[in-house]
Amino acid sequence: EAGVTQSPTHLIKTRGQQATLRCSPISGHTSVYWYQQALGLGLQFLLWYDEGEERNRGNFPPRFSGRQFPNYSSELNVNALELEDSALYLCASSLAGFTRSTEAFFGQGTRLTVV
Amino acid sequence: GESVGLHLPTLSVQEGDNSIINCAYSNSASDYFIWYKQESGKGPQFIIDIRSNMDKRQGQRVTVLLNKTVKHLSLQIAATQPGDSAVYFCAEKENYGGSQGNLIFGKGTKLSVKP
């Protein structure tokens, strides 16, 4: 069974541009989570989608947005890129909404570099 | 903001020794906790989880202890091996609407195993 897949693996953008990151969850998983991991730091929660709806978002500005498609795949969009947005962006998927016995599986991440 | 933190940012142990990684959490309502292992260049991998109605859970070479009184979580690794070298994150499930929620991660502890 395929795991969580993210694309692209690496992405280089110029300050002010927009970046689009993609995630395909494990088959059967309806929830997708996005996290930002700056170099040497922990995972900061960005967004949680379930059944096509945004269920929760972390403390990030509105230029971080996303959506979930009917097939449960997801996109993360970052507008007006800033140098500080350079990080590893991780996507995870789980069965609906992380009930107490639900495990989240992570993809390998997209390394975004803003220059 | 972050509600989960770690006492020690780095830990160096001798191969064969036992390792203990500690974590403090602040949300007494959290009902589910997970330990993840992240190797360089990879996404986090699930190690072990524990629900709030348990104090201890054992896996293969790993044990998680939960002390709800002081809101403390620990991961014990028996007979630490070089392959255990990684960054370890604890995470708690932030409840958002019933039993569902997203994970909030701590900053991580880097475990280095000396041969």
Image (tube, grey):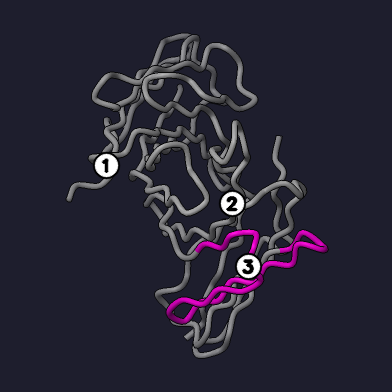
Magenta stretch bounds: B49-72
Real-space CA distance between mark 3 and mark 1, rounded to the nearest whole angstrom = 29 Å
Residue farthest to the right, as pictured: B70
- How packed mark 3 is, by other alpha carbons closer than 10 Å (few <14, some 14-19, many 20 or more), is some
Q: Considering only vertical position in the picture, is A11 above or below B33?
A: above
Real-space CA distance between mark 2 and mark 1, rounded to the nearest whole angstrom = 21 Å
User: Amino acid type of disc 2?
Assistant: Ala
Q: Secondary structure at mark 1?
A: loop
Residue that appears at 56% across and 89% down:
B17
Q: Which residue is mark 3?
A: B54
Q: To which chain does the residue with label 3 belong?
A: B
Q: Considering only vertical position in the picture, is A11 above or below A107?
A: above
Residue that appears at 39% across and 34% down:
A31
Real-space CA distance between mark 3 and mark 2, rounded to the nearest whole angstrom = 16 Å
| Magenta residue check for B62 | yes
**Mark 3 vs 2, N-terminal side:** 3
Q: To which chain does the residue with label 2 belong?
A: B
Q: Secondary structure at mark 2?
A: strand
Q: Which residue is mark 2?
A: B91
On the picture, is A19 further left or further right than B5?
left
